[in-house]
Image: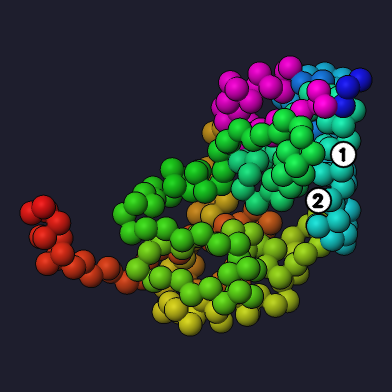
Amino acid sequence: MDSKKGSLVVVGSGIKTVGHLTQEALAWIKAADKVFYVVSDPVAEGVIQRLNPGKSESLTGLYEEGKRRMETYEQMIERMMASVHAGMRTCAAYYGHPGVFAYPTHMAIKRLRKQGYEAFMLPGISAEDCLFAELGVDPATTGCQSYEATAFVINGHVPNPKAALILWQVGVFGRGDYSRSNYQLKGFHYFVEHLAKFYPTDHKVCIYESAMFPGCKPREDWVAIQDLDKARLTPASTLYIPASERATPNLELLKLLESL
């Protein structure tokens, strides 16, 4: 085969695979010579296997207990690139939005493009999209900030308490390894302490987990910041923090702008 004819398209299976897979993503999965997938439930796996039987392979097995996630990510990248190098029209399907907290997909595309191959990504429905819908949040109302939980603390980010804040992967705070069960977050008090620098400790925040299957309800547990270290957290947990202060508009400037 002429290796330069290989290509990669990355698609998202969404949060609820049944209903969240776009028609475009479905078409690419069906047409691929090889499909790799990383999904979180057997329903999604079954759908992908039926769409392209015999050519679909899970990469989830690359995760191992205690193994560094970055090592697994590099192995995923190698598998996708090897398929493209072999001249195959390759499709990679990732849970949620394939470009949100998905290092392997972005890096595989970047490296393949640098080598002269066609590689691109299609958007999908992420946990944040579901959060806006299921919690009734309009990010335009107060504005919205978004950080990965560990990076938020170790990089010393300073949130604006007049805008909403979304913190991803709070249930794996401080952990770079993989575990099949919930993580022991021995350093989680550093996360709570960092939040307490900017918000009242009795400020209510939501531990959110989007509903994975049709007919199921999302998890919406509202707790005070001071009680977060007692709450149950899982790798699927996202933390939504509503604004704790009201913005003060510049009415003179607003009047001036309206007069222009």
Picture disc at residue 79: 1
Q: Residue at image x 65%, y 68%?
A: 150
Q: Amino acid at mark 1?
A: Arg
Judge from the rendering whether residue 160 lies leftward or rightward of residue 252; answer left or right. Answer: right
Task: From the top left corner, tell me how far across and down residue 64 is, in percent.
Answer: 89, 53
Q: In front: 5, or 216?
A: 5
Quarter of the view holding residue 13: top right
- Asked whether 70 or 45 is in front, the reply is 70
In the depicted structure, whether residue 197 falls above or below residue 206: below
For the image, the number of numbered tags is 2
Membership of 235 in magenta stretch: no
Residue 152 quadrant: bottom right
The quadrant in which the N terminus is found is top right
- Tell me which residue sits at (66%, 18%) in the image: 27
Residue tagged 2: 73
Q: Position of residue 162 (x, y in %)?
A: 35, 68
Q: Residue at x 50, y 54 (%)?
A: 220
SS assignment at label 1: helix
Is residue 30 within the magenta segment?
A: yes
Q: Residue at x 43, y 68 (%)?
A: 204
Task: Say above or below: 212 vs 162.
Answer: above
The answer to whether any part of residue 24 appears in the image is: yes
Which stretch appears magenta?
A: 4-31
Asked if the residue at tag 1 contacts the one at tag 2, i.e. Cβ–Cβ closer than 8 Å, the answer is no
At label 2, which amino acid type do we have? Tyr
Q: Is residue 231 left or right of residue 139?
A: right
- Which sits in the foreground, 143 or 127? 143
Q: Is residue 213 above or below residue 63?
A: above
- Mark 2–mark 1 distance (CA, rounded to whole Å): 10 Å
Task: Judge whether residue 39 can be spotted in this image.
Answer: no
